[in-house]
Amino acid sequence: MENKEDKKKKSGWGVGGGTMIGIGVGFFLLPINSLYFVGSIMLGIGLGLIIEAIIKK
C-alpha cells in the first residue's frame, strides 16, 4: 500500500495529463472553432481534477 507522500507526488499528474489530452484534442478542433480549443482544455483540466480526487482516496 502506498503512503501519503507517494500519493502527493502523483497528485499533479492527473491535472497535467488531463491538460495535455485537452490540448491534443483541441488542436484537432482548432480549425473548426477556436472556442472548441479552449473548451477542450477546460474539459481536460476538469477531468484531471476528478481523477486526482479519485487517486487521493
Image (tube, rainbow, N blue to C red):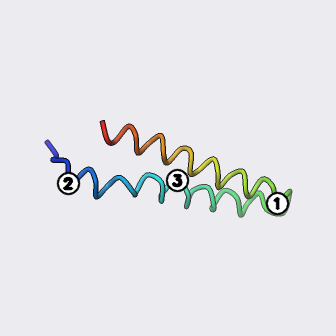
Going by the numbered disc 1, the residue's amino acid type is Ser
Q: Which mark is residue 18?
A: 3
Q: Is residue 11 left or right of residue 1?
A: right
User: The residue tagged with tag 2: helix, strand or loop?
Assistant: helix
Q: Residue at x 56, y 45 (%)?
A: 46
Residue at the spot of label 2: 5
Q: Is residue 31 left or right of residue 43?
A: right
- Tally of numbered discs: 3
Q: Residue at x 82, y 60 (%)?
A: 34
Q: Is residue 34 left or right of residue 41?
A: right
**Mark found first going from the N terminus, 2 or 1:** 2
Residue at the spot of label 1: 34
Q: Could you tell me if the residues under marks 2 and 1 are in contact, i.e. CB atoms within 8 Å?
A: no
Q: Could you tell me if the residues under marks 2 and 3 are in contact, i.e. CB atoms within 8 Å?
A: no
Percent position (x, y) of residue 41?
Answer: 65, 55
Quarter the C terminus occupies: top left
